[in-house]
Image: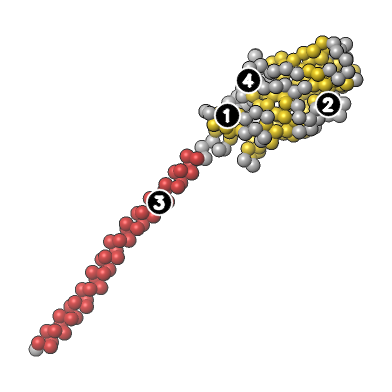
Amino acid sequence: MRSRLALLVLLIVSLIAPIGCGNSNTSETPADNGSATASNKKPGLMERMVSKPAVVPAGTILTVRLGNSLSTKSSRAGDTFTGTIAEPVSVDGKTVIPDGAEATGSVTDSQGMGHFKGGALLRIVLTSVTVKGQSIPVETSANSHSEKGKGKRSAVVIGGGAGLGALVGALAGGGKGAAIGAAAGAGAGTAGAAFTGNKEIVLPAESAVSFKLLQPITVKE
């Protein structure tokens, strides 16, 4: 009789023990899953905060150092040119377009002496900048240089809208190789030097030319 009771007790204990272990494992699983879910959410939020884009407003001046020379003798409308940003651009105190960033542009008009009402005209615009491998299209005012004949030479930055045009510099008289260049107004940077030889306009490589944004651009940080 006693042996039968002992066997019965052992059987009951053996049945109860696995149930207890199962409940212990089950209670730990939700806590682990909750922890994993919380940890997965935090990086996503941080990434969204870091990748918030910056907007460079219209009217911002982009100063570019030319990578190749341009002239009314060799350049034609539609030709492209390259350069680098000469002065960093900041938004809310943070640099979004660093100096040295690649830039590209195009010649919109190029007319030598005798083809532009007795003068010469060279007009260029900026078309894109590259930041962190991203090429960003831009729309800018034109940087225009002209020689009006009889030795009078000028360089003008022009654009659409009242107050958008800005006189950059002017030089009357002077012989072959006379240089033209001046500041493009407060915050506008240094205008490119325009040299005339045989009454042709030349913008040498490494010249700094300024362009004004006509439309805002978005830069991913």
Q: CA distance from mark 4 to mark 2?
A: 26 Å
According to the picture, the residue beneath numbered tag 1 turns out to be 90
Q: CA distance from mark 3 to mark 4?
A: 46 Å
Disc 3 packing (10 Å; few <14; some 14–19; many ≥20) = few
User: Which quadrant is the N terminus positioned in?
Assistant: bottom left
Tell me the residue at 78%/15% (across/down).
Answer: 154
Tell me the residue at 28%/61% (across/down).
Answer: 27
Mark nearer the N terminus (1 vs 2): 2
Give percent across and percent down for residue 15: 22, 76
Q: Do the residues under discs 3 and 1 have CB atoms within 8 angstroms?
A: no
According to the picture, the residue beneath numbered tag 4 turns out to be 187
Tell me the residue at 50%/40% (across/down).
Answer: 50
According to the picture, the residue beneath numbered tag 3 turns out to be 39
Q: CA distance from mark 1 to mark 2?
A: 32 Å
Q: Would residue 141 be visible to someone looking at this image?
A: no
Label 1, secondary structure: give it: strand
* In front: label 4 or label 2: 4
What amino acid is labelled 2 in the image?
Ser
Q: Do the residues under discs 4 and 2 have CB atoms within 8 angstroms?
A: no
Q: Do the residues under discs 3 and 4 have CB atoms within 8 angstroms?
A: no
Label 2, secondary structure: give it: strand
Disc 4 packing (10 Å; few <14; some 14–19; many ≥20) = few
Any mark on residue 179, and which? none
Q: CA distance from mark 3 to mark 1?
A: 34 Å
Q: Say above or below: 32 vs 180.
A: below
According to the picture, the residue beneath numbered tag 2 turns out to be 71
Q: Quadrant of residue 150?
A: top right
What amino acid is labelled 4 in the image?
Gly
Front one among 6 and 186? 186
Disc 2 packing (10 Å; few <14; some 14–19; many ≥20) = many
Q: Would residue 52 be visible to someone looking at this image?
A: yes
**Seen in the image, is 205 located left or right of residue 175?**
left
